[in-house]
Image (tube, rainbow, N blue to C red):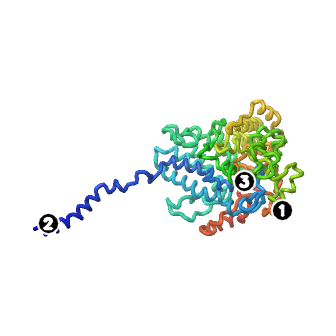
Amino acid sequence: MKTYLKYTLALLLPFSLLTGCDQGFTEINTNRVDPTSLAAPLVMNKAIINTNYLDGFGTLGMLCYNFGIVQQIITPYGSSLSGANYDQVNNSNTPLVWQNFYRNVVKQLVAVLDQTKSDPLQINTYQAARIWKAYVFMILTDTYGDVPYFEAGQGYTTEIINPKYDAQQDIYKDILKELDEASAALTTTQTAITTDILYGGNVANWKKLGYSFMLRAAMRLTKVDPTTAQTYVKKAVAGGVFQSNADNSILRHTSLYNNYIGNHLQAREKTNFYLAAPFVDYLKANSDPRLPIFSVRYVGAKSGSEQAASRASSDPAVQIGMPMGYNDVSISSTFAANNVVSLWDYTQVNLNTVLKLDAPEFHVTYAQTQLLLAEAAFRGWVTGTAADYFAKGIRANLEQMASYGSTIPEASIKTYLDAHPLTAGKELDLINTQYWVASFLDGTEAWANFRRSGFPALKKNPYPGSEVKGDFIRRLPYPDSEIVVNSGKLNEAITRQGPNTLDTRVWWDKQ
């Protein structure tokens, strides 16, 4: 009997252990910390943040190309920093917008759209994502030309891993449609999404953002399709664009969540980038009150280590911009003529104002919007006078300096406005040159509007090793990675658009 009991217990014990282990198995093996999905508004916020940059190194595309092409910020150094300073291809920095947007921003926005498109309780998140997606693709196509658009970001949802490249003309047509439909479809009948990083769920502000983006997109077409441009400019105005600086689309920063351009220039690249002479000279010649806010010069510095606070001056009278067309060796030939002792003695961007670590970054502003309306009024597309919009645009940007903690006194604003009226016969030049200043640190927009308008009337970078056959860089080349993973579709785009070089113009950049 004892033997029988031993065998019975031996057989039952493993069974009891197994059944005992099964109790609470699901609860024990469920991770209650890591989420399996994210709410669409949070993913939307991540896409907005990533539109600026993921880290400091992501800023090198802007620092080495966009700012240098429009001759606002330049570096004399080559190697990893070469780009617009030498008018050359730098395969490390030309793909940065492409890589960040397609790997992160586009993927996130497509996920938001897929998650919210059939949910009547998330109408506003869906429409806001459409607006932001239009803005993101405006940057992508303005930078590279024809890009994957209609099939982009669908690797997970529809398993399209080799998306076709769409013609920029078709992309802009859809961007305008999306902005039109999405802006109109935003509704005040739903509870505000207070976690919205831009406007706290304020639908009225999102509408104004959508229509202000529409105005920008419409004005891109002034050379290639003025009829469509005029149509959508009128739609944007009728819908309601920005009415004050309070409407500006801003990415705010803190001491923990930094302005990455400021972060990079205050650390690794502190002594490498300088304000370009054409920009500084224009501001000085026009007694522009923004110059001391934008600039700082470490007077007499003979090395990077001598760029100390004791030498720092933002006095407009002592600012000297770095001339275009020199490397870190040949720049020494400019010292005597410019009355500087070294390359470190040239003027830099002010890291205590516009590029302090918690300085905001702007996507579209009331100032830019008013200046675009000034041009539209000059063309006879909107009511009101070009001169009035022009003055409002300049004033708005001068007042915008308060966002950096640098308020320009009203008396100084009035003095500048009185000295800079919109002169007959020079309207397009004056409007778009002011747009250039108002877009300082918004490199993608400054470069795009410079190509579209032809203003300011900058001179070609005279660097002797330039790879650009024309006057300026017109687009950035596609990443080498596309040759490996999507060569067939890439070659279709190159055949349609033109050579994959710095000289090839995008569709709206008509000569």
Q: Is residue 273 above or below residue 374?
A: below
- Please state, as top left, top right, bottom left or bottom right, where the C terminus lies in the image: bottom right
Q: Nearer the viewer, residue 174 or 21?
A: 21
At horizontal 83% and vertical 45% (from top left) the residue drawn is 281
Labels 2 & 1 near each other (Cβ < 8 A): no
The residue under label 3 is 66
At horizontal 78% and vertical 56% (from top left) the residue drawn is 76
> Which numbered mark, 2 or 1, is in the foreground of this view?
2
Q: Nearer the viewer, residue 51 or 17?
A: 17
The residue under label 2 is 5
Q: Secondary structure at mark 2?
A: helix
Q: Is residue 128 above or below residue 164?
A: above
Labels 3 & 2 near each other (Cβ < 8 A): no
Q: Residue pushed farthest right?
A: 337
Kind of residue sitting beneath label 1: Pro
The answer to whether one can see residue 261 in this image is: yes
User: Rounded to the nearest whole Å, what is the CA distance between mark 3 and mark 2?
Assistant: 85 Å
Q: Position of residue 421 (x, y in %)?
A: 81, 36
Mark 2, other Cα within 10 Å: few <14 / some 14–19 / many ≥20: few
User: Rounded to the nearest whole Å, what is the CA distance between mark 2 and mark 1?
Assistant: 98 Å
Counting residues from the start of the chain, the first of labels 3 and 2 encountered is: 2
Q: Position of residue 72 (x, y in %)?
A: 76, 49
Mark 3, other Cα within 10 Å: few <14 / some 14–19 / many ≥20: many
Q: Nearer the viewer, residue 2 or 148?
A: 2
Q: Secondary structure at mark 3?
A: helix
Counting residues from the start of the chain, the first of labels 2 and 1 encountered is: 2
Q: Is residue 172 above or below residue 465?
A: above
The residue under label 1 is 464
